[in-house]
Image (spheres, rainbow, N blue to C red):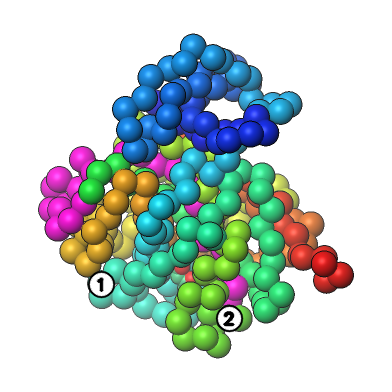
Amino acid sequence: MRIARFTTGDEPRYAIVQQEGDRTFLAVLTGDPLYMPTTPTGERLELGDGVRLLAPVIPRSKVVAVGKNYADHAAEMGGDVPSSPLLFFKPNTAVCGPDDPIVLPDFSQEVSYEAELALVVGRVTKDVSPERALDHILGYTVANDVTARDAQRTDGQWARAKGFDSSCPLGPWIETELDAEDVAVRSRVNGEPRQDGRTRDLVFDIPFLVSYISEAFTLLPGDVILTGTPAGVGLIDHGDRVECEVEGIGVLSNPVVRRDPSL
Ligand SMILES: CC(=O)CC(=O)C(=O)O
């Protein structure tokens, strides 16, 4: 099942995604399926004019991300893989949705895309074992861990480099039935292929990550975990369009803009 968050211009609502050929329909749900039981309202809308997807979740609490979790990416960044998961946070104000602009921060001249598989937590999770970890995951979506490389180098801490507004595009929806053990994680910039990895190459696999993270932080429903990016990262600039894709979920596409300095 695919759960989307969308707007027709007013308050965000949730829906089940129904694909019919190249047409996408949304079967609207009552309430918010991340936090309460929901039922179909009977309303069905077609994605397109006036019906727009939003980030499938705005975490109320946190986005936890994992750095250097593919050996080929750790190598291209000039380092080894860490001996235990390298965790960092992105604030929920970094989250944006499909087609929302990635706004290049004025403090950086070196902004990079990073396609990633993202997990959406479905239950309060503390000290879960790797064996039970997947029971706590509601579903999967696609993330772009947008990173200001220059600030990452100079700041030491990654808060500014990876936490600025619009540095966490998520979408296009939450897929609840994915077997995420071995799916492709890809990116393209202006249609040109850049990353092409597979989750079987994660240094720390998904059950271990959820367990490890839940030892340190209580995970809450709607929290998002970014699992790391494969090799092939590179810079983006004003006017580019970045597509991140996870096999079995879909494509998350965002334009890149630099803020108008006169604003
Ligand atoms: C060096 C990095 O940017 C690490 C990171 O975020 C990753 O996904 O790996």
Label 2 CB less than 8 angstroms from ligand 1:
no
Left or right: residue 22 versus residue 19 is right
* Residue found farthest to the right: 262
Q: Which residue is mark 1?
A: 84
Looking at the picture, how far across and down is residue 169, in whole percent?
56, 52
Looking at the picture, how far across and down is residue 60, in whole percent?
41, 52
* Residue found farthest to the top: 42
Name the residue: 52% across, 68% down.
163
Residue type marked 2: Ala
Left or right: residue 211 versus residue 256 is left
Viewer-closest of 71 and 225: 225
Name the residue: 66% across, 44% down.
99
Viewer-closest of 37 and 155: 37
Q: Nearer the viewer, mark 1 or mark 2?
A: 2
Question: Where are the magenta residues, as a range?
Answer: 125-149
Q: Which residue is mark 2?
A: 151
Residue 9's quadrant in the figure?
A: top right
Instruction: Judge whether residue 122 can be spotted in this image.
Output: yes
Residue type marked 1: Ser
